[in-house]
Image (cartoon, grey):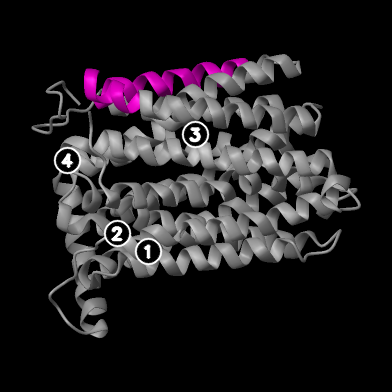
Amino acid sequence: MRKISADTWAWALYDWANSAFATTVMAGFFPVFFKEFWCMGAPAADSTFRLGAANSGAGLLVAVLAPFLGAIADRGGSKKRFLGFFASVGVLATLSLFLIPKGEWPLAALAYATAMAGFMGGNIFYDSLLVSVSRKEDYDFSSALGFSLGYLGGGLLFSLNIFMVLKPGLFGMASAADAVRFSFLLVAVWWGIFSLPLLMLVKERKSPLAGRGHSIRKGLRDLAETFRHIRGLKPVLYFLIAYWLYIDGVDTIIVMAVDYGLSLGFSSSDLMTALLITQFVGFPSAIAFGRLGERFGVKKALSAGLLIYCGVIFWGYKMDSAAEFYALAVIIGLAQGGVQALSRSYYARLIPKDRSAQFFGFYNMLGKFAAVLGPVLMGWVSVATRNPRVSILSLLLLIGGGLVILNFTKAGAVEDSGGADI
């Protein structure tokens, strides 16, 4: 029987907290509401491009800042402080979506991009705290626990929000649009409240160096050293290149799936149901992938998840019914949490523990630069071809390329807890 520490539970609950934003806002209601409420009357291709630009703008901001912030946080022992700041930005920006009137798509895009920056920026420091709350041999399980709680918590709140939209009168609201806007308010409250266990209970090792100014100067010097270190650690460098490619495709599917379904003519209710399916399938599947990583090796389990995504893209290109979208939702739910969790735990094994925020800064930087390219690429292909089906095929280059690099590089002396090749 595996014993899970209070620190690990408190850490994992942050996934429960911020996954409400990822599910209800990022993947669920915002793409639909942006297209039908804030961009009402605009061509579908144009609203797709605007949504992609908002996602990419947030990704670019965090990508530029991530390594610098990670270096400073490691030197100053301030990972929790930075996480609290970014979470607060995300919560307040999500709250502001409740207030933006119909047709004001520039304001909505700005608020959404700011909330995305808070969400992604907080994850830099959340990810880096994995090495503080878990033993190395438990990285796979602990990482998977976080993602599984995220799927469960995000799915539960999303279920309530969907019920509100379907039956707004039961909640004293005049329309489904009012219910969607109120859902943004609920997400902000949920995110804020369930962030507190991590901020209050997780113990972060403090730097012996005093003084914020010294931490900033030394942290920035450490950044250059970390970059040189990464270049010298071939397993880290090759993994980061592979991760940069495949997580681009994975993240783009997450943020653009609903918009893609709308472009194919599926109803918003079908799309919301499919998202719920993904959430609740993802809850046990993330834990299962963690077990697979321990049993067969992280690289093998991660590769299996990426191969599933390649199949999803081919099927998504040809699908023409809501039933197929539901089936794809099940398949994505099986793989999504596993790919995310095992990527994080694999990388945690490769990096120095005392520089986790710096190294995770680079990890998240590459993920966010990927998020800059993926949605814009998909949006641009959609506009250029006027065929959204073609746009999804571009993601094969990213996921397939990452899979190839992951499997044609050697991890050197790095081994997983089960003794299999990583």
Q: Which residue type carries mark 1?
A: Leu
Quadrant placement of the N terminus: top left
Q: Which residue type carries mark 2?
A: Val
Front label number (4 vs 3): 4
Q: Give the percent coordinates (x, y) of residue 333.
A: 52, 26
Magenta region: 289-315
Q: In the image, is 205 to the left or to the right of 100?
A: left
Total numbered labels placed on residues in the image = 4
Q: Give the percent coordinates (x, y) of residue 62.
A: 46, 60
Q: Tell me, for residue 317, which label it has, or none.
A: none
Q: CA distance from mark 3 to mark 1?
A: 29 Å
Quadrant placement of the C terminus: top left
Q: Which residue type carries mark 3?
A: Val
Q: Which residue in the protein does label 4 denote?
A: 136
Q: In the image, is 110 to the left or to the right of 148?
A: right
Front label number (3 vs 2): 2
Q: Residue at x 15, y 44 (%)?
A: 233
Q: In the image, is 342 to the left or to the right of 29?
A: left
Q: Which residue in the protein does label 1 denote?
A: 199
Q: Secondary structure at mark 2?
A: loop
Which of these two is toward me, 84 or 388?
84
Q: Which residue in the protein does label 2 denote?
A: 202
Q: Which residue type carries mark 4?
A: Lys
What's the magenta bit mostly, secondary-structure-wise? helix
Q: Give the percent coordinates (x, y) of residue 36.
A: 84, 46
Q: Is residue 358 above or below residue 169?
A: below
Q: CA distance from mark 4 to mark 1?
A: 22 Å
Mark 3 or mark 1: whose residue is earlier in sequence: 1
Q: Secondary structure at mark 4?
A: helix
